[in-house]
Amino acid sequence: MLTPIISVMVLGLIFGLILGYAAKVFAVQGDALVEEIIEMMPGTNCGQCSFPGCSGAASAIVKGEAAVDCCPGGGRMLAEAIAARLGVSLEAASEDSGPKIAVVSESICIGCAKCFKACPTDAVIGASKQIHAVLKDACTGCGSCTNECPTGAISLEPIPVTLRDWNWEKPALAA
Amino acid sequence: MGIRELLTGVGWGVHPHNDHKRPAADVPLRVMPTPAKLCIPLLQHVGAPAKPLVAVGDRVLRGQLIAAAQGNVSAPVHAPTSGLVAAIGEVTAPHPSGLPFAAITIETDGLDESVSFKTVEDPFSLTPDEISQRIAEAGIVGLGGATFPSAPKAQLGRKHSVHTLIINGGECEPYLSSDDSIMRERADDVIDGVRILMHAVGASKAKVGIEDNKPEAIAAMRKAAQDFAQIEICPVPARYPMGSDRQLVQVLTGKEVPSGARTATIGLLVNNVSTCAAIHHAVRHGEPLYRRIVTVNGGAVAQPGNVLAPIGVLVEDLLAFAGLKSEPARLVMGGPMMGVALPHAQVPTVKGCGGILALTAEEITVVPPSPCIRCGSCVKACPMGLVPLELSAQIHAGEYDTADAMGLDDCLACGCCAYVCPSQMPLVQTFSHAKGEIWRRAQQKKRSEFTKQLAQARQERLEREARERVEAAARRKAQRAAQQAAAAADNNTPSEGAGA
């Protein structure tokens, strides 16, 4: 009775060790670069880049099928970070006008509740037949909601500069 | 090691040949008459802005609490005189951007009626917590310019069992003499404030560091402190930035404050002399911080000197009181080294404002920068032991992280490097920009982590909702089946009964 139990246990242990070792040594690695870019992405899967989610965009960027600044939610900052990571230069033409967030024009909003269903970060709040509003901190400015609005009441506006986040221009050096 | 360092023990910093402190410092203190309008900002300190307690149209009295502190690190704001609240809204902030911030505007009535102040005969009979409480209620913040609320600072000192108070009478910025003025004219108030603060913090001694270019202040303070052996008046070499807490601590105690740490971690707490005088007024006389001494100076000022002015007075009123002999080319709040250029004169003063400078075109000559010649003058001048030329090169190459790793965060923005640079490079401006940029990136990162969490939460919610829908449908189906079964059973029972 005891012999088969012990022998099967020992066999199990040996195979387990072999499998564990093999899993470590022969591990199939995902593209580390893609993983790194995914980590940098907003992760909201808003789909505004026309790729299937942030991971789709990340692999397209790494393959060179998408521009480094294709992510509207990430904005200029993300584009610069990805460009620096991939060692490519950002084209001067892709200069954006700074970070933006969605703003609801209260005089046109009809409270149809379409926009907050489209928001990947639940930044739009409200209920049907109630005027909606956008939570500034939660909005990534991806623009998913602007496509849904039947009255054009929701638009992307630049984030107003406050005393807290105002910064000096980089001073010019001698030519 | 240069000859200066051998003689004074101080190798860093700069000292201009003419520090422009006199004649303004020698003019007796003047008291400014109440102006017609005061704008009292809600954020005059490090921390959360104060919350207004008055409404438009309310009548307020001198010393009345008009906005309460919000949270632990914050400070309340008091009315400097009696009058009517005319507006609660945005006014231009004393900031180079010219952006607005919230303020309470008071139209003064000239009666200067005051609330009754709660005086204390013997502040040493109070517990340290009661003193901290009074300091907090009086809205006292660091008046040297850092504007950190004094009550949490004193509590921090007690928590770290600080043994020595360092009292900062350095006032190293050229042109400014408000601390000099308070030490000359109100030395007894300063010393009493130091004693009260020692009691509040639990420190056993205090060292008052005063730059040796203020002999009158040193004499007055020595006289006021002669009966208190635990308070030592220490003249220090006049060397900018001696008024920086780390530099003063190094000169007075020989200890270096670790990078990124506070002075309290090495058993020291630094407070400004004007702050100590304000603590004396608050604890002994119950008088909140609603006025302070402001130096009005600069080539364009007709009668430069020190003025006891209400906090929230507009710069234009202050300049009108001191008189202008020519149109100023630049207005500066604070000193010429670390002060902020003002967009215009309709800007209120704040608690941390020790001086207003109206400078002429000759005083602000701007020379276009030349390339760096790697002379190393900036390295010698930097009081924090940084290498400004390297930092600047990294920042201009876009390598913000490298600059950060090289100790950019330690930079005081004192401006010594830019002052000594023979190529007139905008070094300190570059560092200010880079600090802002690094902060912005950190904020962006935090924000992106936050939105990632939100997206994940939404995903989970949608999945949960879908699951719940399926479960609810299954439940309804089961219910319907049960009902049908029950109905069938009901139908069967009477038929059976009928058949029986």
Image (spheres, coloured by chain):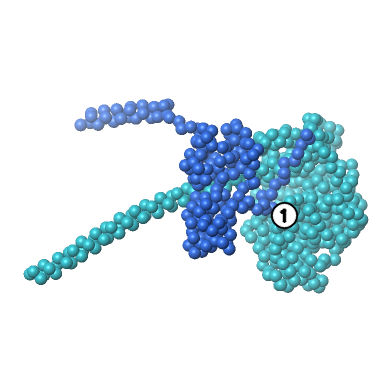
Total marks in image: 1
The image quadrant where one finds the C terminus of chain B is: bottom left
Residue B165: % across, % down: 74, 50
Which residue is at 40% across, 54% downward? B465
Q: Is residue A75 left or right of residue B486?
A: right
Residue B180: % across, % down: 85, 53
Chain A palette colour: blue
Q: Amino acid at mark 1?
A: Leu
The relative height of residue B120 versus residue A84 in the rendered view (above or below) is below
Which residue is at 36% across, 28% downward? A19
The answer to whether any part of residue B154 appears in the image is no
Q: Is residue B217 left or right of residue B54?
A: right
- In the foreground, A133 or B321: A133
Q: Quadrant of residue B474?
A: bottom left
According to the image, label 1 marks what residue?
B99
Q: Residue furthest front?
A: A151
Q: Quadrant of residue B417?
A: top right
The answer to whether any part of residue B58 appears in the image is yes
Q: Quadrant of residue B273?
A: bottom right
Residue B293: % across, % down: 82, 58
The relative height of residue B356 versus residue B337 in the rendered view (above or below) is below
Q: Chain of mark 1?
A: B
Chain B palette colour: cyan
Q: Is residue B345 left or right of residue A83?
A: right
